[in-house]
Image (cartoon, rainbow, N blue to C red):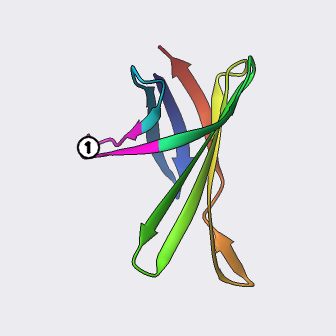
């Protein structure tokens, strides 16, 4: 389990990523309302790279999460093409406690 703190829009937030018994990763939201499973793209001794594609009717977003095992941190960005000037979400990153 990775419990990560970060700032977004001047608010402190927490991202919790859990590895289940089937070796799959998923998010637990702060209100514990739902889970989104990620596909593990690559894992080595230093990093875990996860991806998820979320689709809402004609809209979609691809979320990429990088968990840094050595630095105990994470980075995440959502990518979605809407126009040449808008291609995704803000990059977020922060420090993590790993259980």
Q: Is residue 16 visible?
A: no
Q: Is residue 91 visible?
A: yes
Q: What x and y, as percent, mark residue 23? A: 48, 24
Q: What x and y, as percent, mark residue 25? A: 48, 33
Q: Residue furthest bottom?
A: 83
Pointer 1: what residue? Answer: 31
Q: What x and y, as percent, mark residue 42? A: 70, 33
Q: Residue at x 45, y 22 (%)?
A: 1
Nearest to the observer: residue 31 or residue 84? 84
Asked where in the image residue 43 lies, by quadrant, the reply is top right
Q: What x and y, as percent, mark residue 12? A: 47, 43
Q: Residue at x 58, y 54 (%)?
A: 63
Nearest to the observer: residue 45 or residue 23? 23
Q: State yes or no: residue 32 in magenta.
A: yes
Would residue 57 appear left or right of 48 to someone viewing this image?
left
Report the magenta residues as a range. Answer: 27-37
Residue 98 higher or lower than 60, as above or below: above
Q: Residue furthest top?
A: 99
Residue 43 higher or lower than 99, as above or below: below
Residue 70 higher or lower than 48, as above or below: above
For the residue labelled by badge 1, is the local secondary structure a helix, a strand or a loop?
A: loop
């Amino acid at each position: 389990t990775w419990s990560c703190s970060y700032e977004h829009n001047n608010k402190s937030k927490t991202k919790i990523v859990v590895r289940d018994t089937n070796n799959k990763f998923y998010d637990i939201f702060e209100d514990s309302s739902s889970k989104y499973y990620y596909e593990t793209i690559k894992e080595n001794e230093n990093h875990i790279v996860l991806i998820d594609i979320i689709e809402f009717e004609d809209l979609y977003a691809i979320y990429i999460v990088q968990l840094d095992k050595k630095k105990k941190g994470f980075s995440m960005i959502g990518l979605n093409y809407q126009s040449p000037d808008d291609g995704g979400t803000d990059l977020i990153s922060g420090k993590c406690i790993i259980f």
